[in-house]
Amino acid sequence: MREKPTRTRHLVVLFAITLAIITYIDRFCMGQAAPNIQADLHFTKVQMSVVFAAFAWAYALFEIPGGWMGDWLGPRRVLLRIVGWWSVMTAAMGSMWNLSSMTAANFLFGAGEAGCFPNLTKVFTVWLPQHERVRAQGILWMFARWGGAFTPMLVAWMLHWVTWRQAFRIFGLLGIVWAVVFYRWFRDDPRRHPAVNAAELALLEGTVKHDPAHRHVPWRKLFTRPSVWMLWIQYFCLSYTFWFYVQWLPTYLREFRHLSGAYAARLASFPLLFGGVGCLVGGVVAARLARWTGSVKTARRATASIGCLGAAVLLYVHTGIHDPFWAMVAMGFASFGNDIVMPSAWGACMDIGGKYAGTLSGSMNMMGNMAGGIAPVVAAYLLKATNNNWVVPIHVMAAIYLVGVLCWLLLDPVTPLEPVTDSANS
């Protein structure tokens, strides 16, 4: 009887999903606790935006180094170090006492989280056959978004029982546990994992050639390929609005929608909850459309362009809806459109990057987090200039989505930086 493939690769995906949830819990804790932090430490909106931006800029600056280290050292060692680092810094934020200390702690936290998704993308490139990768990215990002979606309610509940300082310390423990368990179980090379049989290795025949300890990166090709630039810019557009959900949404609901407490926390979950569904739908639709059209390129372009356009329209329309519930439903569907794009974007990183998937995905995520460094500060100054008119920064976000549409119409999301056959000889 023919041997059935083991499913160890699916457990790898489960580890990735768990870590994605932890990353979003840790980073969303700051946004939800922001009003409490502002009250205790006497921060203005502009000062709070500096704290937000510190995380995003650190995340951006350390994306490429984090992804490159995964390509060079292998994700097992890198993830142990960075997850442990950011978990310690999450706990440390509960002990900060002023603007400088909180900004520094959030910067160091962002530096740790920066390597997470590039290294998980590297793991998928090595551990999953090509036909499973985009679907896995869709599932990964769905659970990541849902981790963020339920964090406002989780933090709101916790703040009834503990202070915001204690909440940060509790959340910091989650990553430590994950890092220890993952390091003991995972292997960079599937061939070295005792739970993988020959039949499963046969499924991975096209992936193990991507050397998980590769030093050289074709930097010239990376920085001169037009598709890479389009990939970077479209992700900047996606992330610009996403960071609003992470950082300013709780404050927006209090000041513009005049909500607070548990109801505001539930509504704050809509963008990430709807976005998580969008991630899954985007992965499924792109795969089916590729089969119908016979072209992965066409499928990704169509799915992502429609997602960006729908997000722009819905975000613009949302500001004219007076009922808070339905307004947040519209914002939720805008996030759904945003996240339809995610599996295609990260799938493009795997196909274009190949054995350099960690580095390329790190560079794309770097651009997204540069948006996170810019967006909260721009929003704060727009609010200051317009006497707290929240409509203005939201309309700016809608316009930025239209740039994303143009990028996807020009982007080649499948042609690799180097022929796949080269990796076998590297």
Image (cartoon, grey):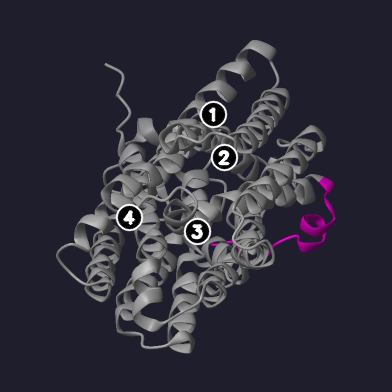
Give the amino acid at mark 4. Phe
**Which residue position holds label 3?**
248
Residue kind at label 3, given as amino acid type: Trp
Secondary structure category for the residue under label 2: helix
State yes or no: discs 2 and 1 in contact (Cβ < 8 Å): yes
Which residue is at the front of the view, 50 or 175?
50
Q: Which residue is mark 2?
A: 342
Side of 238 where 19 appears, left or right: left
Q: Earlier in the sequence, mark 1 or mark 4?
A: 4
Is residue 422 within the magenta segment?
no
Q: Which residue is mark 1?
A: 282
Does the stretch in magenta take in 216?
Answer: yes
Of badges 3 and 1, nearer the viewer stands: 3
What separation in Å lies between label 1 and label 4 (alpha carbons)? 28 Å
**Residue occupying the far top of the picture:** 292
Badge 3 or badge 2: first in the primary sequence: 3
User: Which marked residue is nearer to the observer: mark 1 or mark 4?
Assistant: 1
How far apart, in angstroms, are the residues tagged by discs 3 and 1?
Answer: 26 Å
Disc 2 packing (10 Å; few <14; some 14–19; many ≥20): many
> Which residue is denoted by mark 4 in the rendering?
186
Q: 10 Å neighbourhood of mark 3: few (<14), some, or many (≥20)?
A: many
**Marks 3,1: beta carbons within 8 A:** no
The magenta region covers: 213-226
Image quarter of the C terminus: bottom right
Choose mark 3 or mark 2, whichever is in front.
3
